[in-house]
C-alpha cells in the first residue's frame, strides 16, 4: 500500500445511517472489504435514521406476506387485527399521486418491487419488526384496523435500527471510522479511486476501488436551505442530525454528477415550537405533532389554513411543515377537545411540549400566544356550525365527516370543538430531509451530466434526487434508503471485484 494512503479497501461508504449501513452490509456479503466513514462521533452516529420512529412502508398482499417480515405475530394479534392488503399497485399509486406524477418511475418501480424483499433481508441482518398499534390502528368494534399503507415498524425505532445495523456490520468485519469527514472524492481519468477526509481534523486519504455516497441531504446547512428552498427556511427547526450538511452532494457534483430532483422541495412536518435547533437523540421524534387530522390548526389570525382531514396523516404530514412556515410568525396552534384527546399520539404526552389547557374555549383563546383571540373565537363558532354531524366519525377510515361552507374545508374527521377541557399545542416547521440531490440509475450508479454512469461511484438515501417531489408517503424514506443502499453495496462490490480481476489478468 502506498504511504500516501491511511488505508486501502475495496469499497468506501460515506455515511453510517440506514442507507449507508445497508450498503456496507450488502457490499460485505458480496465479497468486498468495506470501510464506512461517519462524520459524527460514535454517540451521534446514524444520521437522520437514528431520529426516526422506524416505520417502514412495503407492499404486501395479506397476512402471509406480513409473516415474512414479522414471523412472530401471535394468534391473538392476527385475530384482533385487520392488516388488510397494500399491493405493489397501491404503493406505486401513492408515490405517483403525492409526488404529482413527477417521481422517477424507474426508481419508484424498484422501491415498490423490492420493498417486501427488503424487509426479509433486514431480518437476516437481525432487524426485528412489530405492528404499529396506536399510531396506525385504532380499536373500533373490538378490532384494530390498519390504515394508510403502514402496518410495521422496527422494534426500538430508529435508534435500535442503527444500533443493530452497526452491531451486525462490526460482527461481519466492516470497519467503521467515526469523526471522519469526507472532503473530496479521489478520481483519475478512468474511475473513482478513493476519498480524502479529515479524521479529528487531520487530513488523510483512503484508497478504494468504489465509493458509495450515503451522507444525506443538506437540511442541516442553513445557507443551502435558504439558497435552494427559499427565504424563511433559515428559520425552520431541523428534526434530525446536525451533520447532514450537503457535502456528499457537493463532492459528487465536483466529479461531474448530474444534479437531479426537487431542489426547492423538502420533507417538513409539524414540530414543537420550543424544540431545539437540531434533533435531540434523547427525545428522538417526540417533538413531532401528527394528530392534527382529529383537531384543527389555526394561525396567528385565528383561522384555519389547511385541510387537516384531506387524507390520512401518512400522506399529508410531510408537506404541512412548509405551509406552517409560510404562516405569520412561522407557527400554528393545534386545537383538540375531549372527544378526541384519547386519540392523540404518544408524542403529545412527552415532558418537553409547548402546550396550554383550559376548561372553556374562551379561556383557551387567551392562552394561545400570538393569536388574535377574538378572531379565533368567531372562527370556532363558524367551524362548529359547519361540521356535518349526521356523518359518523371513524378514525380508521376516510369517514367523509367534513365541513360545509368554509373557505378552507375539512374533508374527514371533523368534530365540533365544544367539549372541555380543551388542549392546544404550538408548532412550527421541522425539516426532515431535502428532495434534491444526484441522479442514479437502476444499479444505484451515480449518473454524470452526459447521462452516463460515473465509474466506481454509487449513491443511496436522502442525497438521491428524483424519487420524491412536493411530498412523500410516510415510511417510504427508510425503505428507499435500505433498498437502494443494498443495491448500491452489491453493485459497488461487484465493480470492485471486477477491477481486481482486471488487475490480476
Image (cartoon, rainbow, N blue to C red):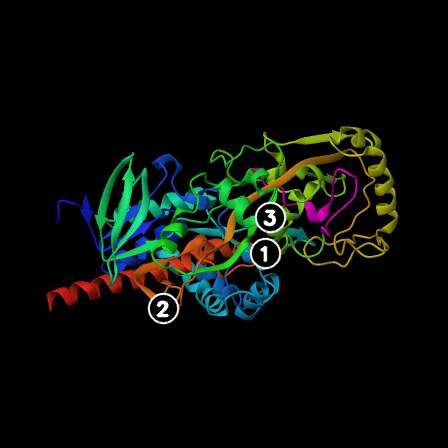
Residue at the spot of label 1: 471
Magenta stretch: includes residue 236: no
Secondary structure under tag 3 reads: loop
Above or below, comparing residue 288 to residue 438 in the picture:
above
Residue span colored magenta: 287-308
Q: Residues within 10 Å of mark 1 (few under 14, many from 20)?
A: many
Residue at the spot of label 3: 135
The tag earlier along the polypeptide, 2 or 1, is 2
Which quadrant of the structure image shows residue 419?
top right
Mark in the foreground, 3 or 1 = 1
- Calculate the distance from the C-alpha at mark 3 to the C-alpha at mark 1: 20 Å
Residue at the spot of label 2: 452
Residue 127 in view: no
The tag earlier along the polypeptide, 2 or 3, is 3
Q: Is residue 251 left or right of residue 423?
A: left
- Calculate the distance from the C-alpha at mark 2 to the C-alpha at mark 1: 28 Å
Residue 295 in view: yes
Magenta stretch: includes residue 298: yes
Q: Residues within 10 Å of mark 2 (few under 14, many from 20)?
A: some
Q: Residue at x 68, y 57 (%)?
A: 311
Q: Main secondary structure of the magenta part?
A: loop
Q: State the mark number for residue 241.
A: none
Amino acid at each position: 500500500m502506498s504511504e500516501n494512503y491511511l488505508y486501502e479497501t475495496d469499497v468506501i461508504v460515506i455515511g453510517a445511517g440506514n442507507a449507508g449501513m445497508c450498503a456496507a452490509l450488502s457490499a460485505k456479503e458480496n465479497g468486498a472489504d468495506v470501510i464506512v466513514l461517519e462524520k459524527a462521533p460514535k454517540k451521534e452516529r446514524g444520521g437522520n435514521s437514528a431520529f426516526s420512529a422506524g416505520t417502514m412502508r412495503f407492499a404486501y398482499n395479506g397476512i402471509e406476506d406480513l409473516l415474512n417480515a414479522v414471523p412472530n405475530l401471535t394468534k391473538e394479534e392476527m385475530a384482533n387485527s385487520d392488516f388488510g392488503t397494500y399491493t405493489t399497485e397501491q404503493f406505486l399509486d401513492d408515490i405517483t399521486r403525492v409526488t404529482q406524477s413527477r417521481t422517477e418511475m424507474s426508481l419508484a418501480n424498484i422501491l415498490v418491487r423490492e420493498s417486501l424483499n427488503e424487509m426479509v433481508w433486514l431480518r437476516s441482518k437481525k432487524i426485528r419488526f412489530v405492528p404499529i398499534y396506536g399510531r396506525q390502528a385504532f380499536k373500533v368494534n373490538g378490532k384494530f384496523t390498519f390504515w394508510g399503507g403502514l402496518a410495521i415498524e422496527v422494534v426500538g425505532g430508529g435508534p435500535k435500527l442503527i444500533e443493530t445495523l452497526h452491531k451486525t456490520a462490526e460482527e461481519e468485519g466492516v470497519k467503521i471510522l467515526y469523526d471522519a469527514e469526507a472532503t473530496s472524492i479521489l478520481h483519475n481519468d478512468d474511475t473513482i479511486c478513493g476519498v480524502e477526509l479529515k479524521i479529528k481534523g487531520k487530513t488523510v486519504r483512503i484508497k478504494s476501488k468504489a465509493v458509495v455516497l450515503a451522507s444525506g441531504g443538506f437540511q442541516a446547512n442553513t445557507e443551502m436551505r435558504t439558497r435552494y428552498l427559499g427565504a424563511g427556511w433559515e428559520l425552520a427547526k431541523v428534526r434530525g442530525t446536525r451533520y447532514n450538511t450537503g457535502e456528499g452532494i457537493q463532492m459528487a457534483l465536483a466529479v461531474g454528477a448530474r444534479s437531479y430532483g426537487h431542489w426547492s422541495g423538502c420533507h417538513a412536518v409539524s414540530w414543537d415550537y420550543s424544540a431545539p435547533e437540531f434533533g435531540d437523540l434523547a427525545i428522538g421524534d417526540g417533538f413531532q405533532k401528527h394528530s392534527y387530522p382529529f383537531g384543527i390548526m389555526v394561525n396567528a389570525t385565528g383561522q384555519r389554513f389547511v385541510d387537516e382531514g384531506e387524507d390520512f396523516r401518512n400522506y399529508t404530514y410531510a408537506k404541512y411543515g412548509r405551509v406552517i412556515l409560510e404562516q405569520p410568525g412561522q407557527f400554528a396552534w393545534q386545537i383538540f377537545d375531549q372527544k378526541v384527546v384519547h386519540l392523540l399520539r404518544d408524542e403529545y404526552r412527552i415532558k418537553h411540549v409547548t402546550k396550554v389547557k383550559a376548561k372553556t374555549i374562551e379561556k383557551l383563546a387567551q392562552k394561545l400566544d400570538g393569536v388574535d383571540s377574538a378572531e379565533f373565537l368567531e372562527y370556532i363558532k363558524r367551524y362548529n356550525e359547519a361540521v356535518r354531524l349526521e356523518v359518523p366519525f371513524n378514525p380508521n377510515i376516510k369517514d367523509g365527516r367534513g365541513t360545509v361552507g368554509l373557505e378552507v374545508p375539512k374533508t374527514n374527521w371533523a368534530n365540533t370543538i365544544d367539549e372541555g377541557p380543551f388542549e392546544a399545542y404550538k408548532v412550527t416547521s421541522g425539516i426532515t430531509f431535502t428532495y434534491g440531490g444526484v441522479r442514479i440509475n437502476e444499479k444505484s450508479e451515480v449518473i454524470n451530466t452526459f447521462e452516463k454512469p460515473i465509474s466506481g461511484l454509487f449513491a443511496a438515501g436522502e442525497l438521491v434526487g428524483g424519487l420524491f417531489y412536493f411530498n412523500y408517503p410516510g415510511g417510504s424514506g427508510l425503505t428507499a434508503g435500505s433498498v437502494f443502499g443494498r443495491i448500491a453495496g452489491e453493485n459497488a462490490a461487484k465493480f470492485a471485484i471486477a477491477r481486481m480481476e482486471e488487475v490480476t489478468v
